Image: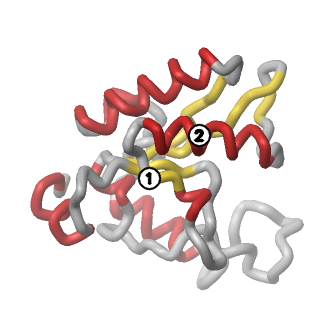
Amino acid sequence: MASRSLLDLNPETRKRAELFVAKCATFGIEVLIYCTYRSEQEQNILFSQGRTTPGPNPRASKPMGNVVTNARGGQSWHNFRAAFDFVPLVGGKAAWNDRALYETCGKIAESLDLEWAGRWTGSLRETAHCQFRDGLTLAQAVAKWRV
């Protein structure tokens, strides 16, 4: 099972994740970080969802479910302890569909030198995902942070 502990992030990313939570709070936004480190095996399981295995949502728009990632194991910043997924909370409940809250959180993340996947274009724009690339390419991250 993927981790949700900030302690499982690399030190540079952990510092930014902690600042992200604190800065969101100053804007009156509570956030839950629900995924940090993910093993390559766990990443491959996610990659297969919607492709070769059904996803967890029986009401998904496609027979195998929706594709949730384009990253195989070893290609996700989660695998290098440099990414986290979050959801804003309203009244203690996940606000998965509150675009305005995600936009505000995304701007906060970007102010902390995090890459917010809500700016990505294409089919897998991911408003819940932040990563700290530290100026590295994926190949350089593999060399620096391979677990």
* Image quadrant where residue 139 sits: bottom left
- Residue 22 badge: none
* Image quadrant where residue 118 sits: bottom right
Query: What SS does tag 2 mark?
Result: strand
Residue flagged by tag 2: what amino acid is it? Phe
The residue indicated by pointer 1 is 115
Tell me what residue is drawn at x 25 percent, y 50 percent: 134
Tell me what residue is drawn at x 42 percent, y 32 percent: 17
Q: Position of residue 24 (x, y in %)?
A: 59, 25
Tell me what residue is drawn at x 72 percent, y 61 percent: 56
Label 1 CA crowd tier, 10 Å (few <14, some 14–19, many 20+): many
Q: Position of residue 53 (x, y in %)?
A: 63, 77
Name the residue at the right extreme. 59
Residue flagged by tag 1: what amino acid is it? Glu
Label 2 CA crowd tier, 10 Å (few <14, some 14–19, many 20+): many
Of labels 1 and 2, the one closer to you: 1
* Image quadrant where residue 30 sits: top right
Estimate the spatial distance between the alpha carbons at disc 1 and disc 2, rounded to whole Å: 13 Å
**In the rendered image, the vertical position of residue 97 relative to residue 20, given as above or below:** below
Query: What SS does tag 1 mark?
Result: strand
User: How many marks do you count on the picture?
Assistant: 2
Q: Position of residue 142 (x, y in %)?
A: 18, 64
Q: Position of residue 131 (x, y in %)?
A: 41, 50
In-image side of 130 versus 86 (left or right) = left
The residue indicated by pointer 2 is 86
